[in-house]
Each structure stands twice: as structure tokens, then as C-alpha cells.
């Protein structure tokens, strides 16, 4: 059985199964789809509903035909003669792929595959839309080269191919691309909206959930609707018999792990502890927890123990190293640098207090 | 054996030949220049005499029996030689006018007779003034000469092993001669023998020299101009005798002569200290003390060799130890492989070991051609052959039996066996080792060389580490005191360091220094390995510039080394705050260095490499202000990175498999979905055991998960220190789940390959689509021949079932006939 988050995913922009929030935006999208659709750039935090809206939009454009999808591995050859493959999900009308899956070779994907798709036009233009759609996920992790590669393609083949980009942060999309698209910002739902959706799900599942727990979930989810629904289901699974009013929200283990790491950092500020922390950071990174999330969570758990006098410096250090993280290559270097910087700040403050 | 015997026999023949030749040549020359004045003749006469001078020494040393024979044979010659004048002739004019010579030669004879009388009185003097060639008296004289030689050798001034000094020198001569004569054993002995006698006549002039030993150098001086003498001159420079004389004779057999130079004679400035202070006793070896030292192991191995490899011992099958044990126990091996950097004493050790155990050795080094054919020929005749001495009555020979070995083959510089010359040398060597009846010692520098690695499988692995400074220092101190060179301990240590712990280099540098005290010791250009370089880089004593230099040893890995190890750099004097402050500086620099690294690698701005050297390596190493307190660690980043890569592939596969249902990207899948999904597929099994299976299968079907995915999920989600809930599942439940999974004919929208290995061979996705009515339309497009082959090879493993979805719910489905076509499938679809 499907997870609730997938089970109750909205299927259309407006209507009975329509999206639950950002209704104004949904109207705009519907309007866009009715007319000649431009290139779109969806951006917004994780769990806000970008993909859902893209799906709904496609359905709006082509009807249920877009749901008949297939997974296809597409092969391509890099200039260095490496043969690589990328998975695409495609229907008759659209293709969806994540070029950043192939790392630095995403440029080749954009130059070869996307361009090739863009060049071929729909034959039966009368029965369908005259264009098809290429959805590129995780566009913000596209390399510069790949993004530049998209520029001309987007202009030249705009008639028979619309590109929909999906990203979390606009700042990593180059300006020329931004200017070629209509930017659809999908902000995270407000707490009220999250609660509304959750209540809808609970009602459909005939679940009896105390309000206090619901509030906790809303608070914990931080506007990530996906997480909110998953948490709700997790609580339900934890408490098969019925959810008590004081039920604990299960915290994902990776978060617990980071929390413990933060505790270690506060506990002792020495070389050996730094070594221990490094090991743990490696562990977190290797489990594909995004480094910026690690930064955020670490800071979140460190700050409460900081005296107010050093908070400013700590936050600025975190920001500095997160910035460097984006400029650099190896997340561990910057995470470690932040941890040690924090240790120094913390220790200095402690010794001053004495 | 046979070869040697042959040698002796033939030598006898040759001798006669030679005599004949000489006389003939004399006569010939006579004919050629009859018109020349007598004086000139006299001069000319001298040359042959001088030529013979060197060999003369040789006779002295040879066993008496042999000498007797030789002298007898040379009688005639000796007489002739007496005529030789003192002045050196220009090279090339070697002719003698035999017929006209007599007058002068007779005079000479008288002189020599006088000297003879003297020599009788004083045997020592006699040695210098060689015996008069009267045939009757000769035998006596010779014996006396031998005695004197012994006396001299015992004189304290000379450190060379007793009794052999003179002998060895002579042998050298013979050796060389031998080499010159195109490896033909037959020729050389006679020649030397004949040449010796003449010298004795000449020597009379040197009578008054106080020490017999000095004779030789003088002679050399005189003869310098001539070709042969030159050779001898060279020989005199050769290193002092390492091995006893018995060994030398064996060396004659092989093409490459083992060089047993005579000990340095008198004030001989040419002899470098390296040779002068070559270890002669075990104790003089640098860094070879202790039971576990390579030297000791080598000796033990050699000692036990016969026991294990000959007679009864050979019949016992000895299992080969694992490669990493090869340095522990040498019994199964017939050969030893000494490896180590240059100048640590590998060759010396090998020689010493043989000498200590009284084994005769044959060396083949890079100067010999060592291709397959040559090796076969040489070694074939070597094993089981006799020493030439056996035939001259030397009693040193050990009785032949199967319980002992008498020879050792030393293959020096085996890593130099390369190119066309030595083609197939190593493989032949391995073959020889397998069948050898004598121990073989191979010596090389680079053990990890590809060529050597195959050889190493058959060898007792003895590694010579670089000796530590203290080890070298003690020996150097001895040398310094003997050479009366004053040097401070610090300077000495510096020289050792600069020489890269190379004992030989150190001695050379010391000698340089002795000549001019301010001579700068050249730093030995070392090729640093990454570990060594990293150690130096993190060493608090090196300067910033040195650190930077070390960075360039391998600019790829040095930043990683620094990052891995800077946390271990501590300073006891530091308070915790100071320590952490240093670390902060360092980590900040490292973080900056990473940005530069990205610019270099990503943007190709290699001009930033200098900046990176500072930011990533040199400065952080200094910033901590501590010393490396722990063992140098290899960068764990590499390993972590690859394990992260593996997890990433697993996760990507998960995302791909669930793609039809899940909208999340890889990162949010990892943070949000994965824990929940894992719970979904484990919890029912834990709570309801077998009854939970249907629920799990339902979930897995819904998300198109396969068993591998479930395992991948577990791997990604389970954190160290946390209990893996999957471990709580009873094994029988697990088994039954697997069975049920295998039974259920599930439809998957993808093909099943092993992604975790990072290779996805064959494009096995399928292109299937539906037209508007929902009918299945199958599309196959051959990607290329390859995918077809893949298909045939593993038809059973690749179960390709396609499921299409209508409106999000599982729609009609149909097993496809095989996954083919990847690439262009999508396009076909869009056309429709």
C-alpha cells in the first residue's frame, strides 16, 4: 500500500482533487497551460509541492496520457569516450530526467539528449499540443556548463519543446536561464495550510489524532508537507492501537545522529573530540544528507547551548563556511572547519567566564 | 665440474702454445728491424719484461705446485727477460731483438745473481728482488717468496684479511686477464704465469725499497704507458678483498669477476673510503644487528638451505606461505630476495653472509648479459662444478656431499634485467630457482616493480629498511676517527640526512668533507614517496619552503594528508585554548584551500597551484604549532568518498525504482522517504512475523521495490551505533519473504541490474507504451548488438517485466519479451 503522501497527492490544479494551497498560483498555471506555455522554472523548498504542481500541469496540458510513463535508460557517450546512461521517465508527451545524476557529464546530457528531443517535433500537431515538455529535475545542481548549454536550446526550439526546470534555490540558476523562463515560486505552505492538509488526510484515513500531536507535527515539519504527512503516518505506525495525546514525534535517525554530534562538540573541545566529530560527519555525508542541511541542523542544536554573547559569531561562522561549501568541493573540510571554529569560540567564551 | 677440469687441461696446452708464440714473435721482430741500433733494442726489450711484471706477482701467489710448473715452462723466457732495460718504451714498440739482446741480458744476469744472494740472506728483501731464473734454484726460491708474502700480510698496518692480500691481488690480475680473453678460460692462466717471471728480473732495481708491498705500485708507474698495465692499475683501485681467496677462484668461472682487489697498498690516495671501510666483519655492517635483521635471517636461511633443499629435506613438501608471510620463514624458498634502497648494504650483506659461512659465490650483475640463453648456459655449468683450486691442491674444499652447499649464486640488480638484452631473464631466473641445487640470492632496489613481483613469489623476502641516523652515525664516527676527521655530531647527522640515509652516499660525502671542510654536501635528490613527503610536510622542524616543496611531490594527495593528520598535531605546552586556536587557523586555511582546489580542478586555473600549496598544505601544517603525535594516517577521505559514492548509487537506484510514485529527489528521499519506507517494509515482519509478509509485499509492489532495494534501504538508513530493525526480523520470516517474493510474478517498470557495483552493463530498459485506448504497444529498438548479447548471456537473471500505469493505479500489464532498446525508445514514444 502506498504511503499516504503518495496516496493523497493532488491530481489536478483546480477542482475536487486539486491542490490545497497556493490556489491563486494554480489559476495562473492553468491559464498558462491553456495558452501557449512558456518555459517554466519552479523553485521552492523541498516538500512544498513543486513536482506535484508540475505533474498537475502536465495533466492539464495533455490529459491522463502523461500518466502512462515508462522508465528508459538513455545512453550517451562523453567526449572522453565514456559510455554513460541516464534514466528518464517519459510518456508520449513529456520526458523527465535528472541530468545531475551523471555528475559532471550533465553538460553532455543537455547538449545531446535534450537537444535531440527538442529538435524532433510532434507529428500529430492537430490532436495534441504542438509541443512536448522536458522536465529537468534538480536544476540547481546542474553545472554551469550544462546551464549554458541549455540557453540556446531553449530559445531555438521553443516552438516544439518547452522546458520545465525544477529547483530548490534560484541562486544557483544562471541569470540567462532565469530570464528565459517564467519563474513559478512555490513557497512552503504555512502552518495553517499544512494543518489543513493533514486534517484532510486524517479524515480520509479515519484516524483519530489528538490536536496536540497534530500541532507538534505541524511545528516539526517546518513547512515541509511531505515530511508532515510522512510523520503522521509514522506516528500512526508507532501507535497502532490509537494515538495518545502525548505521543512523541519520531525523529529521523540522521537527525538524532547530528544531534548527538552536536552534543559531543559541546561536551569537549579538543583535538581528539574534533577527530571523533569528523568521523561522524563523514558518516552523515556519506549517507547523502545534504551538507547544507547538516550545517543547519548542527547550528540548530548548537545554538541553544550558546551564551547569547557568542551567538552572533557562531552564526556568522556557519554562514561563512556554508558559503565556502558551495564554492569548494569537499564538504567535510568546511564542516570540520566550522566545528573547530565553533569549538574555539565556545572555549574562548568559557575561559573568559572563568 | 667437467668444465673446470677441461680448463686445467687446456691451460697446459696453451702454455706451450704461448711459449711458442712468444719466441716466434721475438724472432719475427728480429727480422723486421735488423738495422736498428743496439740501444734501441735494449729499450725495446724492456717492454715485454714490464708487461710481464704484473703477472709475476701472480705466480707468487699461486699455489706452489702450479708455480713450479709454470716456472719451468717459462725458463727460457725468464732468461730472455733478464735483458730487459729500465727505460720504458713507447707503446706499440714491443718487438724484441732476441739475437742481439744477449750482451745486455748477460750483464743483467750477473746483477740479479748478486741480488739473489742478498735475498737469501733476507727473505723479505728477496721478495722485492725477484729470484734469479736459474732453473735449479727456482723451486726453493718460490717457496721462500711465499713465506715472505705471508709475513707481509700479517703486518699490522694492513687490515686486509691475512694471507690473502697478495694472493688476491694476483688473482685479480688473473681475473682481469681472464675477462679480457673473451671468457676463454684456456688462455688466461698460461699468460699470466709466463708474464710473471720476467718481472722478477726487473725488480732487482727496487731492491732497496723497505717494504715489499711497495714494489707493485712502482712497477705500475713504470708500465703505465702500456696498455696492459693500465688494466692492472685499475685493478689496484678496486675495493679491498671482501671474500676469501677461495671465492675468487670461483669467480673466475663466471663471466663477471667478483672483484677481490688487493688491500690498499701504502699511501694510496685513490682508494675511496667507501671501499676502504667496506665492512669486513659482521659487526661493521650498519643496521644489521638483532635476530630479526635481514642479515641474520639471510645467514640462517643460507645455513639451513642444504637441510631443506637437498637430500631428504628436499623431498618434504613445504607449502608456500602466503605472500605476506614470505618474510617470516624462508624454509620453503630456494632463493632469497634482498630489497631496499641503494646504499644500505644489500650486496655487502650478501657477500658477508657467504664469506661467514664459507660459501663460494658467483655474482651476476647488470653488467652481464642475462638473457635466457646466457643464464641457462652460465648457471648450468656452475651448479655442481669444482673450483679450479681443487686441482691445485688447495685443501680448502669441503668434501662433496649432499648435506652441504658450496656455492651461492648472487644475482645482483635483478631489477635491471630489462630491455632486449635480458629478455625473458626473470622468467628464466624463476625457472632456475625452481630447479636450483644451490641457494640463489637476488638483489634489487624496487620490490614492487612489476617484474620483480613475479620473482618475489619464489623468494624469501628480505627487506632492507633504511638504517636510522643513529645506526649510520656510529659507523661514521669510527671512520672519522680512523681518518682523523673532526666533525660534530650535528654535522654528521646533517650529512646523513642529506644523503637520504644512504650509507654509501654518506661516506662519499664524508670524504668530500675531509678534503675541504667547507665543502657543501649536496643534497641527494630523493624521490619522495607520498608518505615520506607527508611526514616531512607535517614535521614541525621543516621550513615553510620545504613544506611547500613537499606539497609538490603529489599535489593531489598532499592536501588530503594534511587534512587527515592536522588534528593529530599537538603541543604539550599548549593550553587547550591555544591548541584549539591553532586548529581553527589550520582548518580555516584548509577550507580556503579547498576553494582554490575547486578553481584549479574545475576551472583549470593551474596557476593557483602555488596558492594552494600554501593554503592547503604548508600553512596549516605550521598553524597548529604542534608536532605529529600519532602515526601518519592515510587520508580517509578517499575511502569515505568512495563509500559515499556507493551509497549514492544505491540511493539513485532506489529513487529511480520508485520514481513513478515518489516525487522526491535523491536528497529528500534520503532524509524523508527512506526512514519511512524502511519502516514500512520491516515493521510488519517484526510485529506479525510471517503474517506481515503480504503487507510488505504490497508496499514493495506499490513502490516497485526489489529485494536489493530493501537491502539498500537498510544500508542507507541504519546508522552506526543504532540497532538495525531488520536484524530483529526472524531469519525464517526473512527466508519466507524471499520465497514469496521469488514466487510472486511482479511487474517492474525497469530492468534489474546490479547498480551497486557501479557498472550497468547492457541497456535493458524496455520501451512500452500505450495508445489512447490503453492497448499495449511494445516497442523494441535495438540499441546495438551488444545489448542482444547481454540478453543471451543472462536470460534468466534479467527479468524484465513492464508495468504501465493508467491514472496512477496499476494498470494492465504484460511481461515483455526481453528488455532491449534504451536510447531512442523515448523518442519513438513522443512521436506517437
Image: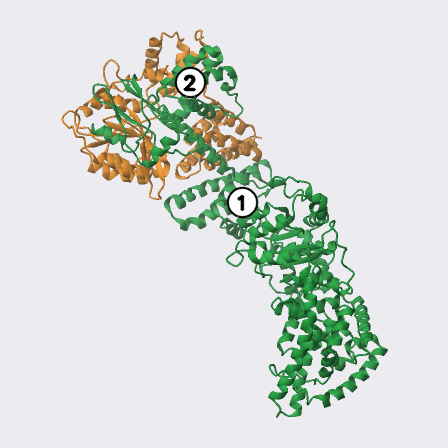
Chain colours: A orange, B green
Residue A217 appears in view: no
Viewer-proximal residue among B531 and B684? B684
What residue is shown at x 61% (from left), y 89% (from top)?
Answer: B33
User: Please, which chain is the residue tagged with disc 2 on?
Assistant: B
Residue B148 percent coordinates (x, y): 81, 71
Vertical side of B598 occupied by B767: above or below: above
Residue B493 percent coordinates (x, y): 65, 55
Q: Quadrant of residue B161?
A: bottom right
Residue depth check, mark 1 versus mark 2: number of the one nearer the observer: 2
* Count of marks overlaid on the render: 2
Residue B741 badge = 2
Residue annotated with mark 1: B621
Circle 1 packing at 10 Å, graded few (<14), some (14-19), many (20+), is many
Residue B482 percent coordinates (x, y): 73, 63
Q: Is residue B320 left or right of residue A305?
A: right
Residue B51 badge = none
User: In 3D space, how far apart are the residues under numbered discs 1 and 2 (Cα atoms)?
Assistant: 56 Å
Q: Quadrant of residue A178?
A: top left
Viewer-proximal residue among B209 and B574? B209
The quarter of the picture where the N terminus of chain A appears is top left
Q: In terms of secondary structure, where does tag 1 sit?
A: helix
Amino acid at each position: 500500500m502506498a504511503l499516504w503522501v503518495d496516496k493523497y497527492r493532488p491530481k489536478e490544479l483546480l477542482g475536487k482533487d486539486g491542490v490545497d494551497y497556493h490556489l491563486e498560483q494554480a489559476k495562473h498555471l492553468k491559464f498558462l497551460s491553456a495558452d501557449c506555455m512558456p518555459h517554466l522554472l519552479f523553485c521552492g523548498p523541498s516538500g512544498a509541492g513543486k513536482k506535484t504542481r508540475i505533474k498537475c500541469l502536465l495533466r492539464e496540458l495533455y490529459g491522463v496520457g502523461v500518466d502512462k510513463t515508462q522508465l528508459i535508460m538513455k545512453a550517451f557517450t562523453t567526449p572522453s569516450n565514456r559510455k554513460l546512461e541516464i534514466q528518464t521517465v517519459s510518456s508520449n508527451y513529456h520526458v523527465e530526467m535528472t541530468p545531475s545524476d551523471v555528475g559532471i557529464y550533465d553538460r553532455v546530457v543537455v547538449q545531446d539528449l535534450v537537444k535531440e528531443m527538442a529538435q524532433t517535433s510532434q507529428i500529430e500537431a492537430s490532436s495534441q499540443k504542438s509541443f512536448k515538455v522536458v522536465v529537468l529535475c534538480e536544476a540547481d545542481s546542474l553545472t554551469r556548463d550544462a546551464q549554458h548549454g541549455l540557453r540556446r536550446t531553449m530559445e531555438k526550439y521553443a516552438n516544439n519543446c518547452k522546458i520545465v526546470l525544477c529547483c530548490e534555490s534560484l541562486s544557483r540558476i544562471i541569470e540567462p536561464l532565469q530570464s528565459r523562463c517564467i519563474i513559478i515560486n512555490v513557497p512552503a505552505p504555512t502552518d495553517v495550510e499544512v494543518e489543513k492538509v493533514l486534517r484532510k488526510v486524517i479524515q480520509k484515513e479515519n484516524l483519530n489524532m489528538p490536536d496536540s500531536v497534530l500541532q507538534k507535527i505541524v511545528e516539526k515539519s517546518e513547512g515541509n508537507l511531505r515530511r508532515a504527512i510522512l510523520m503522521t503516518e509514522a506516528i500512526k505506525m508507532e501507535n497502532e492501537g490509537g494515538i495518545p495525546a502525548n505521543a512523541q514525534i519520531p525523529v529521523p535517525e540522521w537527525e538524532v545522529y547530528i544531534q548527538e554530534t552536536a552534543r559531543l562538540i559541546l561536551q569537549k573541545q579538543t583535538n581528539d573530540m574534533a577527530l571523533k566529530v569528523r568521523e561522524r560527519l563523514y558518516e552523515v555525508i556519506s549517507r547523502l544528507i545534504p551538507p547544507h542541511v547538516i550545517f543547519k541542523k548542527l547550528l540548530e542544536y548548537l545554538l541553544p547551548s550558546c551564551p547569547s554573547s557568542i551567538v552572533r559569531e557562531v552564526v556568522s561562522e556557519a554562514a561563512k563556511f556554508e558559503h565556502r561549501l558551495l564554492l569548494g568541493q569537499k564538504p567535510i573540510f568546511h564542516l570540520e572547519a566550522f566545528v573547530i571554529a565553533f569549538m574555539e569560540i565556545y572555549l574562548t567564551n568559557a575561559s573568559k567566564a572563568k | 665440474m667437467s668444465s673446470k677440469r677441461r680448463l686445467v687441461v687446456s691451460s697446459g696446452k696453451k702454455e706451450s702454445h704461448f711459449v711458442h708464440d712468444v719466441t716466434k714473435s721475438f724472432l719475427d721482430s728480429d727480422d723486421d728491424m735488423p738495422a736498428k741500433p743496439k740501444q734501441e733494442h735494449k729499450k725495446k726489450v724492456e717492454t715485454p719484461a714490464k708487461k710481464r711484471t704484473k703477472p709475476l706477482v701472480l705466480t707468487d701467489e699461486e699455489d706452489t705446485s702450479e708455480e713450479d710448473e709454470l716456472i719451468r715452462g717459462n725458463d727460457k723466457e725468464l732468461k730472455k727477460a733478464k735483458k730487459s732495460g729500465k727505460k720504458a718504451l713507447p707503446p706499440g714498440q714491443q718487438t724484441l731483438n732476441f739475437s742481439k739482446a744477449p750482451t745486455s741480458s748477460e750483464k743483467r744476469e750477473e746483477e740479479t745473481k748478486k741480488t739473489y744472494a742478498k735475498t737469501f740472506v733476507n727473505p723479505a728483501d728477496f721478495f722485492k728482488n725477484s729470484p734469479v731464473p736459474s732453473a735449479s734454484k727456482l723451486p726453493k726460491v718460490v717457496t721462500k717468496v711465499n713465506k715472505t708474502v705471508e709475513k707481509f700480510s700479517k703486518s699490522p698496518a694492513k687490515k686486509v684479511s691475512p694471507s690473502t692480500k697478495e694472493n688476491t691481488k694476483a688473482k685479480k690480475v688473473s681475473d682481469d686477464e681472464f675477462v679480457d680473453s673473451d671468457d676463454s678460460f684456456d688462455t688466461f692462466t698460461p699468460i699470466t704465469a709466463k708474464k710473471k717471471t720476467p718481472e722478477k728480473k726487473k725488480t732487482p732495481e727496487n731492491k732497496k725499497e723497505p717494504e715489499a708491498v711497495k714494489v707493485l705500485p712502482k712497477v705500475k708507474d713504470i708500465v703505465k704507458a702500456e696498455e696492459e698495465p693500465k688494466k692492472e692499475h685499475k685493478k689496484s683501485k678496486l675495493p679491498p678483498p671482501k671474500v676469501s681467496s677461495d671465492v675468487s677462484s670461483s669467480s673466475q668461472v663466471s663471466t663477471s669477476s667478483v672483484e677481490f682487489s688487493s688491500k690498499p697498498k701504502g699511501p694510496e690516495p685513490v682508494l675511496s673510503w667507501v671501499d676502504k671501510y667496506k665492512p669486513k666483519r659482521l659487526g661493521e655492517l650498519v643496521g644489521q644487528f638483532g635476530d630479526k635483521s635481514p642479515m641474520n635471517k639471510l645467514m640462517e636461511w643460507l645455513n639451513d638451505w642444504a637441510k631443506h633443499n637437498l637430500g631428504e629435506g628436499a623431498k618434504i613438501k613445504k607449502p608456500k606461505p602466503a605472500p605476506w608471510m614470505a618474510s617470516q620463514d624462508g624454509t620453503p624458498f630456494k632463493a632469497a630476495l634482498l630489497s631496499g634502497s641503494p646504499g644500505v648494504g644489500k650486496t655487502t650483506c650478501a657477500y658477508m653472509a657467504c664469506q661467514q659461512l664459507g660459501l663460494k659465490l658467483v655474482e651476476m650483475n647488470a653488467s652481464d648479459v642475462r638473457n635466457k640463453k646466457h643464464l641457462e648456459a652460465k648457471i648450468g655449468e656452475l651448479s655442481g662444478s669444482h673450483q679450479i683450486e681443487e686441482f691445485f691442491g688447495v685443501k680448502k674444499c669441503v668434501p662433496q656431499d649432499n648435506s652441504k652447499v658450496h656455492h651461492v649464486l648472487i644475482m645482483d640488480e635483478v631489477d635491471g634485467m630489462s630491455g632486449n638484452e635480458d629478455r625473458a631473464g626473470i622468467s628464466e631466473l624463476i625457472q632456475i630457482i625452481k630447479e636450483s641445487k644451490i641457494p640463489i640470492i637476488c638483489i634489487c632496489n624496487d620490490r614492487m616493480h612489476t617484474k620483480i613481483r613475479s620473482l618475489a613469489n619464489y623468494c624469501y623476502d628480505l627487506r632492507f629498511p633504511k638504517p636510522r641516523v643513529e645506526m649510520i652515525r656510529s659507523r661514521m664516527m669510527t671512520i672519522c676517527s680512523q681518518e682523523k676527521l673532526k666533525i660534530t655530531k650535528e654535522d654528521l647527522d646533517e650529512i646523513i640526512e642529506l644523503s637520504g640515509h644512504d650509507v654509501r652516499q654518506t661516506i662519499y660525502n664524508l670524504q668530500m668533507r675531509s678534503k675541504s671542510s667547507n665543502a657543501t654536501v649536496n643534497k641527494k635528490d630523493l624521490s619522495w614517496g607520498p608518505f615520506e613527503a607527508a611526514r616531512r610536510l607535517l614535521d614541525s622542524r621543516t621550513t615553510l619552503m620545504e613544506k611547500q616543496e613537499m606539497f609538490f611531490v603529489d599535489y593531489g594527495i598532499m592536501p588530503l594528508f594534511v587534512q587527515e593528520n592536522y588534528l593529530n598535531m599537538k603541543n604539550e605546552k599548549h593550553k587547550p585554548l591555544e591548541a584549539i586556536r591553532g586548529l581553527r587557523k589550520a582548518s580555516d586555511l584548509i577550507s580556503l584551500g579547498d576553494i582554490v582546489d575547486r578553481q584549479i580542478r574545475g576551472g583549470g586555473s593551474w596557476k593557483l597551484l602555488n596558492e594552494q600549496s600554501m593554503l592547503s598544505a604548508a600553512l596549516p601544517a605550521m598553524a597548529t604549532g604542534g608536532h605529529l603525535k600519532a602515526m601518519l594516517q592515510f587520508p580517509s577521505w578517499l575511502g569515505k568518498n568512495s563509500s559515499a559514492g556507493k551509497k549514492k548509487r544505491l540511493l539513485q537506484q532506489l529513487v529511480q525504482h520508485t520514481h513513478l510514485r515518489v516525487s522526491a529527489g535523491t536528497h529528500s528521499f534520503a532524509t524523508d522517504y527512506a526512514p519511512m519506507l524502511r519502516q514500512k517494509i520491516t515493521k510488519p515482519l517484526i510485529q506479525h512475523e510471517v503474517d506481515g509478509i503480504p503487507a510488505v509485499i504490497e508496499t514493495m509492489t506499490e513502490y516497485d521495490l526489489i529485494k536489493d532495494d530493501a537491502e539498500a534501504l537498510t544500508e542507507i538508513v541504519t546508522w552506526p551505533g543504532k540497532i538495525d530493525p531488520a536484524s530483529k526480523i526472524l531469519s525464517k520470516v526473512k527466508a519466507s519473504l524471499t520465497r514469496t517474493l521469488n514466487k510472486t510474478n511482479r511487474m517492474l517498470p525497469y530492468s534489474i541490474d546490479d547498480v551497486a557495483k557501479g557498472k550497468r552493463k547492457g541497456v535493458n530498459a524496455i520501451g512500452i507504451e500505450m495508445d489512447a485506448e490503453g492497448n499495449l504497444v511494445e516497442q523494441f529498438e535495438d540499441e546495438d548488438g551488444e545489448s542482444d548479447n547481454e540478453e543471451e548471456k543472462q536470460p534468466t537473471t534479467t527479468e524484465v517485466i513492464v508495468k504501465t500505469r493508467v491514472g496512477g493505479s496499476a494498470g494492465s500489464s504484460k511481461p515483455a519479451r526481453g528488455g532491449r532498446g534504451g536510447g531512442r525508445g523515448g523518442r519513438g514514444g513522443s512521436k506517437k
